[in-house]
Amino acid sequence: MQIAENILQTEDLSVFYGNKQVVTDVTLDVPRNHITAIIGPSGCGKSTLLRCFNRMNELIPDASITGKVLFEGQDLYAETVDPAEIRYQIGMVFQRPNPFPKSIYDNVAFGPRINGFRGNMDELVETSLKRAALWEEVKDRLHASALGLSGGQQQRLCIARTLAVEPQVILMDEPCSALDPIATLAIEEVMRELAEEYSIVIVTHNMQQAARVSHYTAFLMVEDQRIGILVEYGESRQIFTNPTDERTEAYITGRFG
Amino acid sequence: MIRSTQRADFQARLARRKRQSTIFAGLCMAAIAIALLMLVVLLTYIVVQGYSRVDWQFLSSFPSRFPERAGIQAAVIGSIYVIAVAGVASFVLGVGAAIYLEEYASRQKFTKIIQVNIANLAGVPSIVYGILGLEIFVRTLALGKSVLAGGFTLALLVLPVIIIASQEAIRAVPPSIREGGYALGASRWQTVWHLVLPQAFPGILTGVILAVSRAMGETAPLIVMGALTFVPFAPDGPMSRFTVLPIQIFNWTSRPQAGFHEAAAAGIMVLLVLLFIMNAAAVFLRFKFRDRM
Ligand SMILES: Nc1ncnc2c1ncn2[C@@H]1O[C@H](COP(=O)(O)OP(=O)(O)OP(=O)(O)O)[C@@H](O)[C@H]1O
Ligand SMILES: [Mg+2]
């Protein structure tokens, strides 16, 4: 398969919660400026794998990893790397929209502010909201509470908030699972546009969504008590039309999972 | 056949269950009626006895040998001073400790032991804190029997309650908010300060004010640490000697003259009004902060 330059790579990555292993020896390359989807049945370790990319798993007290994660060729877990700096460059959008209980403006401005941004904040807020396709809907109420937005608007606000710190990678964990089909399409459209400048990794349960938006797809599975096995990884077109592994085929045609 | 006997059984039992239910409701009502009645009797008694004494003269005078000239100014100002010190000190320490326990400490055995002990401390008799205050603040730190020492003593007393209330308020902030902060590159401090605390603040504030209102009614620890009982002056600074309302009231009730008993009742009314103001402030601030979000 033909892959562009890689922005993220894992090498024999395993993750443990206590002594329970939930990601097993995953080796995977995430190409720059493309959308990579992670699919697989519930509980197979998708979220856990995704959270390795911005070191969010460290916030869970007894989580540990072995193997390597490289970001632009650098070891993400090296002693000298500050997790806050990593999260500044690798943003994350969560499954449930989690706007801060502040105004729409302050939500977007939060990231730049804490990172010491010194430019024109109004402009940054506007461009971020525009790129997340939310500007038109909120431009007249920037100082109203973000909690008054609909679920789909909140999720786009969370995307805008992530964009405002200008990360290189955006990780999305089932960003549309709490949304209706129209809001979902709006977010997919946003993703497609963002993929020109950003590298996106998305976890999704929605096979059509993975097929629609992603360039590459990774299929994770649970087998014989072993969790988080990477079964197949390749171009989405090939995975969804002509998978090489029969387990992938069984999953995407809905025969299990 | 079987079904019809079952149904008859059910009907019989249903009647009994309904009866039980009525009796239980009646008992509960009696309980609350008794509690309310006691309260009303108590308040009426106090108001009847004291209300003729509550006037400007009473509020602005110092204690006196003559009941009709005795006033409460020293005690009111003393109470306000001491509670202000106790409130600030316990707020800072209590919220700090709660933040540490909830956001920084690892969930280990040691933290659990601390946690259990804080809960236990909340149950320690208040007089013990008086002894502690006497040793630490009055003697070791040489603050003397001052407003500062009294305030710190009461701060220790309410600290466990404030820590627990603040912890609960902090815990009630959804983890997804913290994750959102960390995911944007916020440090732990930034996440706590900008995201967690603003949301936990109304809850923390309510806990602090309720705890401090309780402290305002405390007598024993302050007597032990050496607050005065007869103070013909208002405290003029943190190192001044002082008395507080409950001590003044206690002092008056122990005198034989009926005039002092009236003064005591009037003092209780003043104390109740102050408590009421503080509780009202708690409610008001809670709503104010909730609206802002
Ligand atoms: N904090 C945790 N402590 C212990 N085990 C955990 C923890 N979080 C997740 N797990 C376990 O790790 C495994 C993988 O979880 P993960 O959340 O990564 O799955 P997922 O593929 O994202 O599932 P879903 O599609 O349902 O979101 C599951 O078996 C889960 O029970
Ligand atoms: Mg998940």
Image (spheres, coloured by chain):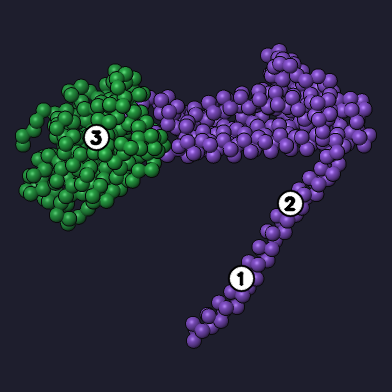
Chain colours: A green, B purple
Q: Which amino acid does label 3 sit on?
A: Lys
> At numbered mark 1, what does the secondary structure look like: helix, strand or loop?
helix
Q: What residue type is labelled 1?
A: Arg
Which mark lies nearer to you, 2 or 1? 2
Q: What residue type is labelled 2?
A: Ala
Gap in angstroms between the C-alphas marked 3 and 1: 64 Å
Q: Where is residue B188 in the image (x, y as percent from the top left)?
A: 40, 26
* Mark identifier at residue B35: 2
* Mark identifier at residue B17: 1
Gap in angstroms between the C-alphas marked 3 and 2: 62 Å
> At numbered mark 2, what does the secondary structure look like: helix, strand or loop?
helix
Figure quadrant of residue B212? top right
Which mark lies nearer to you, 3 or 1? 3
- The chain containing the residue under callout 3 comes to A
- The chain containing the residue under callout 2 comes to B
Q: B279 above or below B232?
A: below
Residue to which mark 3 is pinned = A130
**Horizontal side of residue A68 vs B266, given as left or right:** left
Q: How crowded is mark 3: few (under 14 residues within 10 Å), some or many (20 or more)?
A: some
